[in-house]
Image (cartoon, helix red, strand yellow):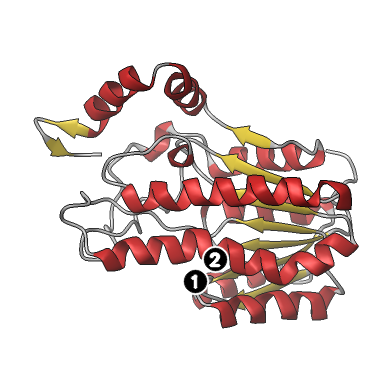
Amino acid sequence: MSDFFKNKVVAITGGSDGIGRGLIDLLIPLGAKIATCGRNQDKLYDLQVRYAGASLHCVVCDVSRYDDCKQFIDSTIKTFGGIDLLINNAGISMRALFEDASLDVIKKVMDVNFYGTVNCTKLALPSIIERKGVVVGVSSIAGYRGLPGRTGYSASKFALNGFLEALRVELVEKEVNVMWVCPGFTSSNIRNVALNQSGNAQGESPMDEGKMMSATECAAHILTAIEKKKRTLVLTFTGKRTVFMNKFFPGWTDKLVRKFFFKQGELVT
């Protein structure tokens, strides 16, 4: 990569695991100034120890809470003087049929995935506009194609895509680039902490994480797309195929998705 990220202030939500952590691991050697947040204080502490001496600012934050988002964004601006890039990466998933799921599960997923992005973007936007910066949302294939057992997750990602698309048009003349990323199936902790029908973490992944794109590889694609000022980024062959088929063959895709997620009438994936 070029010197594009050198001395840029990059705020990343959900940086203690998965794609967020992959972004940090790649950006620090490039000379970026990083601010990140997460709910797990121990993981953030480990991150600071690993990168002691680097320009890294960590804040304990639950992005579903506006006051937490304000503390994260305000402290980032106070520490580094502004924000050039905001990468809204924090997210949570679910795995439960809608008929069985508590409505609190749907609300929690929406609060983290959608309103977390809205909160942080609203708070950081004046600084990003001033610096002609970038807003990124880490979305999902579930934001293009509704997935069974993930009604709330799909709803949150559809909402996220629509929000960012509208925002992109609003900010074109202010020279702010807005991009949304759909990683496809990427190895991360999101499936382990996905909420079940009662709102508790699943504690396991139903998929073979070892066969998926790594979080670091995904992060590298995201950084390249940011530098090239892309509009959207859809990753993995499965992800691109799903988006294509859903656009042109939606009925057929319904059947294929049903077959993938259900075995003998039971949700298994």
Relative vertical location of residue 230 with respect to residue 167 in this rendering, above or below: above
Residue shown at the point (79%, 39%) measured from the top left? 229
Q: Label 1 vs label 2: CA separation? A: 5 Å
Q: Which residue is label 2 attached to? A: 116
Q: Which residue is label 1 attached to? A: 64
Image quadrant in which the C terminus is located? top left
Closer to the camera, 114 or 229? 114
Asked which secondary structure carries label 2, the reply is helix
Closer to the camera, 50 or 215? 215
Q: Amino acid at mark 2?
A: Gly
Can residue 181 be seen in this snapshot? yes
In the picture as drawn, the residue positioned furthest to the left comes out as 264
Residue 258's quadrant in the figure? top left
Residue shown at the point (55%, 44%) measured from the top left? 215
Closer to the camera, 215 or 179? 179
**Residue 175 at x, y percent in the picture:** 87, 49
Q: How many marks?
A: 2
**Residue 222 at x, y percent in the picture:** 67, 41
Asked which secondary structure carries label 1, the reply is loop
In the visual, does 144 lie left or right of 98? right
Q: Residues within 10 Å of mark 2 (few under 14, many from 20)?
A: many
Q: Earlier in the sequence, mark 1 or mark 2?
A: 1
Can residue 15 be seen in this snapshot? no
Image quadrant in which the N terminus is located? top right
Marks 1,2: beta carbons within 8 A: yes
Relative vertical location of residue 256 with respect to residue 74 in this rendering, above or below: above
Residue shown at the point (60%, 41%) measured from the top left? 181
Q: Residues within 10 Å of mark 1 (few under 14, many from 20)?
A: many
